[in-house]
Image: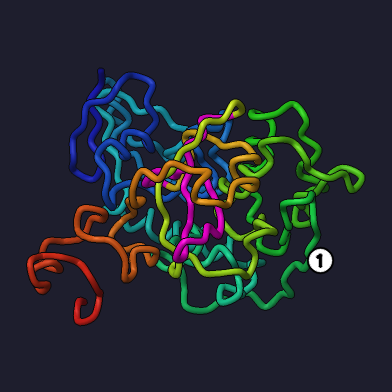
Amino acid sequence: MIKVTIDGIEIEVEDGTTIMNAARKVGGKIVPPAMCYYSTLKGSGGKCRACLVKVAQGSAKDPRPMPKLVASCSTAAQDGMVVQNITSQEVLDVRRGIVEMLLVNHPLDCPVCDQAGECELQNFAFDHGLQRTRSEFPRREFDIIDIGPHIKLHMTRCILCYRCTMVADQLTDQRVHGVLWRGEKSEISTYIQKAIENDFSGNMIDVCPVGALTDRHFRFRNRVWFLAPFDAHRHCTKCSGKAVVWLRGEEIYRVTGRKDEYGEVKDFICNECRWDHFSKTDWIIEGPRKFEGWSVINANKYDKETVELPEHLYSKLDNKKWETFEGVT
């Protein structure tokens, strides 16, 4: 075990733990944002540069600071290391530039994007972005295409995080899509217009941090804040069968994998669970899905036991029951 200090908080972690995962053990605002890193996907990280941090002290043996900011998702913590994240103005300034770079070609179509309400780039831009772009160049534009019977690709929204290619590599041996061309012409596409039809292709949608890969069956049918997500499971011979069913009334609008607090799926689900079982009788409902208190998905749903909000918000409600957000700020 080694000791690492992140934003003044000392934590003990196993040797070999990355700075990112060390920060996640503490939790809260000191956790660097991640647009490409995904703990369950080998080889992910180090591409978006959103998680850059400042190492003010390399280790107890070598206290010299690192000369440049480092990617916390791919840099191993050392015993005695001192890391600055939100306490470093240099980090915050660079992070603002990273957001601006990611948004250079990203379209302003949040009002019609199916990822709205659960978009990692939306949250990242809200926390660190500028109010307007400084770019005067035309944005890249691509046609919206179907890359299989279940998935629609909006390449215009893609930030090239490579998650979709990695999940295809590691869950199936039939990957038929990848990154074509180089530089600003790089794009995700299928080889010779092949269709993506493997049994785990739907996980590409779950791991996409933006709205580049969308569910053709759920497109434009509803908004996530109108739906009530519930943990559910079923007996499945292909996957764990553990999923989240999104209900409005008695109707299931979509089925997704279970994401943790960092938006990562630990147990990937098969396409049969995702698209072939839209009846409540097909599932064993476990209970409401727990989300962060600030999530728009929580609006007008659930009670205090389901979500996490500061205690002062509940003091305004009778019997501390959260039945509505009216009057609560």
Residue 108 location, quadrant = bottom right
Q: Assess whether residue 306 is covered by the magenta stretch.
A: no
Residue 69 visible at all: no
Residue 192 location (% of width, % of height): 92, 45
Membership of 250 in magenta stretch:
yes
**What percent of the width, then of the height, locates residue 260?**
40, 43
Whether residue 32 is visible, yes or no, is yes
Side of 134 where 69 appears, left or right? left
Instruction: Please report the residue visible at 49 percent of the width from the left and 33 percent of the height from the top.
Output: 267
Segment colored magenta: 239-262
Check disc 1 and give the amino acid type.
Asp
Q: Viewer-proximal residue, 85 or 25?
A: 25
Quadrant (top left/top right/bottom left/bottom right) for the N terminus: top left
Point out the residue furthest to the bottom here: 327
Q: What residue sits 63% from the left and 70% below the top?
A: 220
Q: Determine whether 50 is above or below 121 in the image.
A: above
Residue drawn where x is 28% and y is 36% of the image: 25
Q: Residues within 10 Å of mark 1 (few under 14, many from 20)?
A: few
Left or right: residue 39 versus residue 180 is left
